[in-house]
């Protein structure tokens, strides 16, 4: 949409104050865009005060010029006032950037609209809106029914978790930030997988923590180094993704689970289990291992489970599970940050996940994800021979690849964007100074499997130009 905004801005400049922009139908045909995209672009320029929409007459360039926000001002004083280190959100902003027209999205980790349960979501929102009490203030910890649903979903019906051990938050990233701030003090060390999800690094940076990397291989985090790393760093928190790890797709091997928990127990440390991809399992996957939290009698594991990934990026609902003093700390930090999660959103999530249509959606999604994974690996093998594709997991939403010697991932990402395909450079998943020969390619944000194939062709063109 950014391209359309700039085109409209140019049209307004040519016509001058009071001038009428071309008719919407004409611009849609000329630029090959949808009416919705054009309407949103006009909304942006209207908010800036550059244009005025007159129903029945058209869109005109404003006589008064842009609003006050567009007037040049000297804001340089803020650089000194806000001097100091800040978390690096470059990778996160890249993943959150709105898709540009005609660019194949192999970067974003959210489901394309065609994969979302749109009808079920709309029906759930409608039912939730009619429920008595939906618009009243919810408990700070979350509504009891939703907490109970998550407790059973994470720990099992006979597991160690109850509704009172669950805290509802506004999405997985909020849960991660809340947990790190609640369980650490500024300056503390925190162990993170290497490579890891960029949001983990940003959340640690926002809490002024020192990240200590622990290597990941095909079987998950390297548990044999945990005892020494805990001891030398003094860390009391480990953040990990035991299932379909982002970005490698690794699943923590069965023989490593007990060793991981033993190392954390010996260090008196918490394990933050980020379980965001559990409901992105593919239909050819074997039985999944239980969450670490389901086999945790002593409250070492703080579990994060989000419903955003398998539904919609706008259904920002997640659960944190913890017991004892840890739960109290999490709740208090959550209340300071946001008071509570809006009740209508909680009620809608509960309506969605307890409806028969949700199970149907997950089954269909499991099939679609497997098909997209196979399309991605096959297309890369056929069209990108210079790219090494590592084992693609039967779960999650991405593949992890290695570039040829002498080719940097940031250069490939920039060249790929010029070829109209967006990808994630692997260096974004490491601490500064880490490897720069990897790419993470997502297959859930593209409009279709055919678009994934086109994306692979465009990526190969970018690689060939760089080589």
Image: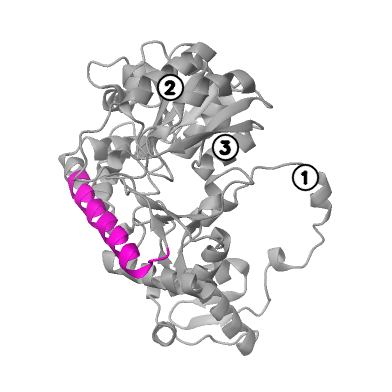
Say few, some or many: other residues with alpha carbon within 10 Å of mark 3 (under 14 / 14 to 19 / 20 or more): many
The Cα atoms of the two marked residues, 1 and 3, are separated by 19 Å
* Foreground pick, 374 / 111: 374
The Cα atoms of the two marked residues, 2 and 3, are separated by 22 Å
Residue 382 coordinates in the image, percent (x, y): 31, 68
Residue 256 coordinates in the image, percent (x, y): 37, 25
Q: Which callout, 1 or 2, points to the residue nearer the camera?
A: 2
Q: Is residue 203 above or below residue 399?
A: above
Left or right relative to 351: residue 261? right
To which quarter of the image does residue 71 belong?
bottom right
Residue designated by label 1: 82
To which quarter of the image does residue 191 belong?
top right
Q: Is residue 183 visible?
A: no
Circle nearer the N terminus (1, 2): 1
Left or right relative to 70: residue 104? left
Q: Which mark is residue 203?
A: 3
Residue 116 coordinates in the image, percent (x, y): 28, 53
Decide: marks 1, 2 in contact (CB < 8 A)? no
Stretch of the chain drawn in magenta: 362-386
Residue 323 coordinates in the image, percent (x, y): 43, 14
The Cα atoms of the two marked residues, 1 and 2, are separated by 40 Å
* Foreground pick, 59 / 42: 42
Residue designated by label 2: 260
Q: Is residue 375 magenta?
A: yes
């Amino acid at each position: 949409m950014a391209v359309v905004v700039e085109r409209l801005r140019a049209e307004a400049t040519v016509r001058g104050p009071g001038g009428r922009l071309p008719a919407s139908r004409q611009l849609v045909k000329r630029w090959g865009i949808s009416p919705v995209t054009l309407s949103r672009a006009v909304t942006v320029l209207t908010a800036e005060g550059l244009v005025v929409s007159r129903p029945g007459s058209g869109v005109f360039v404003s006589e008064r010029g842009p609003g006050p926000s567009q007037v040049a001002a000297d804001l340089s004083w803020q650089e000194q006032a806000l001097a100091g280190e800040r978390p690096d959100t470059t990778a996160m902003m890249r993943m959150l950037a709105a898709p540009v027209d005609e660019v194949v999205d192999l970067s974003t980790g959210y489901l394309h609209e065609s994969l979302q349960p749109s009808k079920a979501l709309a029906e759930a929102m409608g039912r939730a809106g009619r429920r008595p009490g939906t618009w009243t203030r919810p408990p700070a910890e979350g509504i009891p029914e939703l907490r109970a649903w998550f407790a059973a979903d994470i720990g099992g019906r006979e597991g160690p978790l109850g509704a009172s051990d669950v805290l509802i938050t506004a999405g997985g990233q909020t849960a991660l930030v809340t947990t790190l701030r609640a369980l650490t003090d500024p300056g503390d060390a925190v162990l993170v997988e290497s490579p890891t999800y960029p949001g983990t690094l940003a959340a640690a940076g926002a809490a002024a923590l020192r990240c200590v990397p622990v290597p990941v291989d095909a079987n998950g985090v390297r548990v044999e180094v945990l005892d020494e790393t805990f001891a030398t760093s003094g860390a009391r928190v480990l953040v990990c993704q035991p299932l379909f790890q982002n970005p490698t797709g690794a699943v923590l091997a069965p023989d490593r689970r007990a060793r991981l928990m033993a190392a954390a127990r010996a260090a008196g440390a918490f394990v933050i289990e980020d379980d965001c991809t559990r409901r992105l399992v593919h239909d050819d996957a074997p039985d999944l291992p239980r969450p670490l939290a389901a086999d945790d009698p002593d409250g070492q594991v703080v579990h994060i489970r989000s419903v955003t990934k398998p539904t919609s990026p706008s259904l920002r609902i997640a659960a944190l599970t913890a017991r004892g003093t840890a739960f109290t700390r999490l709740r208090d930090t959550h209340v300071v940050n946001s008071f509570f999660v809006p009740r209508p959103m909680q009620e809608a999530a509960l309506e969605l996940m307890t409806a028969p249509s949700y199970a149907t959606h997950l089954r269909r999604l499991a099939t679609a994800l497997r098909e997209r994974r196979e399309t991605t690996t096959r297309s890369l093998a056929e069209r990108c021979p210079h790219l090494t594709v590592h084992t693609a997991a039967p779960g999650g939403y991405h593949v992890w690849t290695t570039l040829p010697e002498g080719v940097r991932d940031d250069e490939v990402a920039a060249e790929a964007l010029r070829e109209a395909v967006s990808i994630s450079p692997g260096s974004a998943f490491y601490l500064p100074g880490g490897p720069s020969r990897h790419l993470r390619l997502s297959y859930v944000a593209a409009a279709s499997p055919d678009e994934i194939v086109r994306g692979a062709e465009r990526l190969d063109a970018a690689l060939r130009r760089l080589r």
